[in-house]
Amino acid sequence: MSTDPSASTSISLSSHPHAQASQYTEAQANYSDSNLPPPPQTGLSIHLDPDPDAYTAPPFHTHDFYCKLEKQFPPPIAHSLMRATRALLVHRIGRVRRDGLDRKDLDNQAYLFKAAMSEARTEITMRTRKETASINTATSALRREVESLQVKMQEEIANLKHEVQMEVDNRHNEARADIKQQAIAIEDVLNRAIIGLGDVRAEIERVKWDNMRRTVTGLASFILFTIIFMELRPKPPPPPVPQPNFTPKPSMRSMGINIDEMSPDPEREGLENSEYVT
């Protein structure tokens, strides 16, 4: 019957109370070195003897085992089984001693592990510090460059604003001067036009008065000439007055027209009553 030596080693180490106590103590030490809270205590009962020389009960009671074998088997068979069990125990204990790790090896491995962890922690810390320092240096350089760019940009913006303001002022002054010149030119043209219109109006009034004077003079001369001509013309003799000859016209009764049968009409009545129709 073959078994795994690592399994037997782990069983033998974990079953021994001193091994459990050393493992718990090393775990507490590791957690105290790594600044972590200690592991929670399990329900295993660990009994540490104050005196290492005191007697402890062995994990395997040989006499009780032999008595149980003797009850079930004959004495020679029980004796042979006891020897075989003893040889098997000696072989397993020897293999555990050869292949297993004792407390000193575990302490060495724990020390090496702690040293490796400390070295890795130191290396990680130094690397982190270097990276942080380089990042801070790059950040400071970038901040200084940004500040210089900001100052330069502000100066450029101020210069550009000043130039734009000067250009706007110059253009405004030029536009104002152009407007003034145009206003002066328009006023000059307007004054000349007013003077010209005044001259034209005066000329028109003069021509109108001349025409009116000529017309009045012509009419007065024509009237005076007509009056003189009428006065100086000989008067003709008056013509004789003609005598009117009236011939009676026939009336409607003499013509055989019955006026009574006709509808009364004021106009007809007037015509009937009148003796003559002209």
Image (spheres, helix red, strand yellow):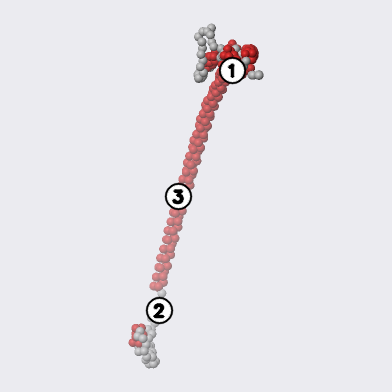
The residue labelled by disc 2 is 236
Type of amino acid under label 2: Pro
Q: Secondary structure at mark 1?
A: helix
Q: Residue at x 62, y 16 (%)?
A: 73
Picture quadrant where residue 258 is located: bottom left
Q: CA distance from mark 3 to mark 2?
A: 64 Å
Of the residues under marks 1 and 3, which one precedes in the sequence?
A: 1
Of the residues under marks 2 and 1, which one precedes in the sequence?
A: 1
In the figure, 104 relative to 172: above or below? above
Q: Residue at x 50, y 19 (%)?
A: 43
Looking at this rendering, what residue extends furthest in the left direction?
Answer: 273
Instruction: Give the class, few, some or many, for how many residues have Cα within 10 Å of label 3's Cα (few <14, many ≥20).
Output: few
Instruction: Give the class, few, some or many, for how many residues have Cα within 10 Å of label 1's Cα (few <14, many ≥20).
Output: few
The residue labelled by disc 3 is 194
Q: Position of residue 271 (x, y in %)?
A: 36, 85
Q: Residue at x 48, y 45 (%)?
A: 186
Looking at this rendering, what residue extends furthest in the right direction?
Answer: 1
Q: Secondary structure at mark 2?
A: loop
Type of amino acid under label 3: Ile
Q: Secondary structure at mark 3?
A: helix
